[in-house]
Image (cartoon, grey):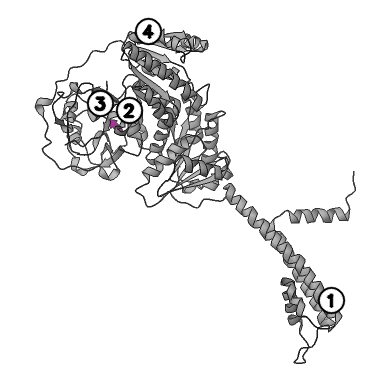
């Protein structure tokens, strides 16, 4: 064993001292300067080495110390010194010491400033904000969420979004600037840190945040990562005592229970696969529905708001439907805390109850004051329920969400329905045989084949199907490759359909919203942009957590859902009517009319693909064959 010498100990202490940073180094330089100036000044003073001034009075110790200090800070000061060689040598010594001290000090300060700037560039400084939104983690969904929150905050004086992710701060800022662009009055602050580290979480100042959004990562085990974030956030010993408002994204519903244990009652979960599966199951049977959902969930048009209206107390839900000119009432929120979409028309509105309405903004939910709604009684049609008939659905492709889609779809279709799945992996057939041999309303058949090959598509019974779902291969390929395969399938499919003059409804899943514009050349009836819908839902809940039960009701097959029903079932086609007439016709059937879709505009992106949500009720509209009324109904 090596013997530790005094020199080793001295060097060890010196190394430890030097490693403590610029402040310690500056302190040592200060002490060294004081020691140098005091010692040399004391020698000059005791030995009377300084020249006599013109007054003839010898210089005092403090005057000599001041002279030494000036020569320490400025080496040029020594050029004017006069006196004997002992004094000049003493001043030369203090000047040399000063050169060493000052140059070292400049180096230390420069290094410290550069280090601080590097720390700032890395995004490790504490965020001093109040009432901001914190986004934990990074994925492609962050761009939609930031964009939507910026729109939601447009009528506020200022807003702030803080993003904490294990990525370089500058890279995050550059990507947001490229993908989102101008965020208006909303500032976006990026910080580098691990969302599962409690100390790094404190950088984003979650205790002062209004809302916290936990994103699911795009690699590894995403649900496990979100659970870790919730544990680090909720169980931090230094956290605030008040509950957080957390919106967390999960992929698999089976993991929600354990995530709820981690986040307790402070978290509202958005189960991505479950949400997209429900929307796919509903949309494949009625084209245009995904556009309705997108319009309803983004902040660019009309959204869902809660509003207490004393003027409606004592009136019925039916009367409330007609009481607003530019807002569409869809339900009631009782003072006891329960929401009801499309309640019975004779439901009374009591004190403290709130209407749930689709409107442009929270301050536009106001009574019209009208008493004459101009309802055309002669234009209304008598309700004639259409019989449910078996449906035939063709699914091209497969991903992890399709299992849930089949289960949800079984709740909507009539008994005797059939569903044909075509995919390249024969394991899909084995999975279908294991999981879907006991569905109540439909039989599932598997056929192996490459959905991007024209020969495979031409051999399918396209003339015998009502709906076609083109799924993305999101489990096997990245976003752009998966969307590219979907585009190839759509182009072949559209060509074959036109040649055979067929009219099945074609619904396609896209991962990147930008690829939807490319896919429109294939003229699919509707597109489901998966990640965008999930992002929109998270942004809505981040602004208003009370919307969670409302959307749960809309997506639940047991309650009232959104449907696009033939306009001729409500009013006479070719006859101009106002939307008050449509609302009244729907109310007599126990339904809530919230908009319409014009078939002539179905391919026009500038007209929201024909979807008109929450129209001005007094404006006249003439419906034609193929137009649809958007209603909230039980079936």
Question: Sequence order check: which comes first, mark 4 or mark 3?
Answer: 4
Question: Sequence order check: which comes first, mark 2 or mark 3?
Answer: 2
Tag of residue 600: 3
Q: Residue at horizontal 30%, vertical 38%?
A: 302
Q: Is residue 127 magenta?
A: no
Residue 209, compared with residue 518, is above or below; it is: below
Q: Is residue 333 left or right of residue 396?
A: left
The residue lying toward the viewer, choosing from 490 and 157, is: 490
Judging by the rendered image, the residue that carries numbered circle 4 is 461
Q: Position of residue 435 (x, y in %)?
A: 46, 12
Q: Residue at horizontal 40%, vertical 51%?
A: 158
Distance (Cα) linking label 1 and label 2: 92 Å
Judging by the rendered image, the residue that carries numbered circle 2 is 554
Label 1 environment density (alpha carbons within 10 Å; few <14, some 14–19, many ≥20):
few
Q: Do tag 1 and tag 3 residues touch (Cβ < 8 Å)? A: no
Q: Position of residue 228 (x, y in %)?
A: 55, 34
Q: Do tag 4 and tag 3 residues touch (Cβ < 8 Å)? A: no
What is the chief secondary structure element of the magenta stretch? Answer: loop
Instruction: Identify the image quadrant of the N terminus.
Output: top right
């Amino acid at each position: 064993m090596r013997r530790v010498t005094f020199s080793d100990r001295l060097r060890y202490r010196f190394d430890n001292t030097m490693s403590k940073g610029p402040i310690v180094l500056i302190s040592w330089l200060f002490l060294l300067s004081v020691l140098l100036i005091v010692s040399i000044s004391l020698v000059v003073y005791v030995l009377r080495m300084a020249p006599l001034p013109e007054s003839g009075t010898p210089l005092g110790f403090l005057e000599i110390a001041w002279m030494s200090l000036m020569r320490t800070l400025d080496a040029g000061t020594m050029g004017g010194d006069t006196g004997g060689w002992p004094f000049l040598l003493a001043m030369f010594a203090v000047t040399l010491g000063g050169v060493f001290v000052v140059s070292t000090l400049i180096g230390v300060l420069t290094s410290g400033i550069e280090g601080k700037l590097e720390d700032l560039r890395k995004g490790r400084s504490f965020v001093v904000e109040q009432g901001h939104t914190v986004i934990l983690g990074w994925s492609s969904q962050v761009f939609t969420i930031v964009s939507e929150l910026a729109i939601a905050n447009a009528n506020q004086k200022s807003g702030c979004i803080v993003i904490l992710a294990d990525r370089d701060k500058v890279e995050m800022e550059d990507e947001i600037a490229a993908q989102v662009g101008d965020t208006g009055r909303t500032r976006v602050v990026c910080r580098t840190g691990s969302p599962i580290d409690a100390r790094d979480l404190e950088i984003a100042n979650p205790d002062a945040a209004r809302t916290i959004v936990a994103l699911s990562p795009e690699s590894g085990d995403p649900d496990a990562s979100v659970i870790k974030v919730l544990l680090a956030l909720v169980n931090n010993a230094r956290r605030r005592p008040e509950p957080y408002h957390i919106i967390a994204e999960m992929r698999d519903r089976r993991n929600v229970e354990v995530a709820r244990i981690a986040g307790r009652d402070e978290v509202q979960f958005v189960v991505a696969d479950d949400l997209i599966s429900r929307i796919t199951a509903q949309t494949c049977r009625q084209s245009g529905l995904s556009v309705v959902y997108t319009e309803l969930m983004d902040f660019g048009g009309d959204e869902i708001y809660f509003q207490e209206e004393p003027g409606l107390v004592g009136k019925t839900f039916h009367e409330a439907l007609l009481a607003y000119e530019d807002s569409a009432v869809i339900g009631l929120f009782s003072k006891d805390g329960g929401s009801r979409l499309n309640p019975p028309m004779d439901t009374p509105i009591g004190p403290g109850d709130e209407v749930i309405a689709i409107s442009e903004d929270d301050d536009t939910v106001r009574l019209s004051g009208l008493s004459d709604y101009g309802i055309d009684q002669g234009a209304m049609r008598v309700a004639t329920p259409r019989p449910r008939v078996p449906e035939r659905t063709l699914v091209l492709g497969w991903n992890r969400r399709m299992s849930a889609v089949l289960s949800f779809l079984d709740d909507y279709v009539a008994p005797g329905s059939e569903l044909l799945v075509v995919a390249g992996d024969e394991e899909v057939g084995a999975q279908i045989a294991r999981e879907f041999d006991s569905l109540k309303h439909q039989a599932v058949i598997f056929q192996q084949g490459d959905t991007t090959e024209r020969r495979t598509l031409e051999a399918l019974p396209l003339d015998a199907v009502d709906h076609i779902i083109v799924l993305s291969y999101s489990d096997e390929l990245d976003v752009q490759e998966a969307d590219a395969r979907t585009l190839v399938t759509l182009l072949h499919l559209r060509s074959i359909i036109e040649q055979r003059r067929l009219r099945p409804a074609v619904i396609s899943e896209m991962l990147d919203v930008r690829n939807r514009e490319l896919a429109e050349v294939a003229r699919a009836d509707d597109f489901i942009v998966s990640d965008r819908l999930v992002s929109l839902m998270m942004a809505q809940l981040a602004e208003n957590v009370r919307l969670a039960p409302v959307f749960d009701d809309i997506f639940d097959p047991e309650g009232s859902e959104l449907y696009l029903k033939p306009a001729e079932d409500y009013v006479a086609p070719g006859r101009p009517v106002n939307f008050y007439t449509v609302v009244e016709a729907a109310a007599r059937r126990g339904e809530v009319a919230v908009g319409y879709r014009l078939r002539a505009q179905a391919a026009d992106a500038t007209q929201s693909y024909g979807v008109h949500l929450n129209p001005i009720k007094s404006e006249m509209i003439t419906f034609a064959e193929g137009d649809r009324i958007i209603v909230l109904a039980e079936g």
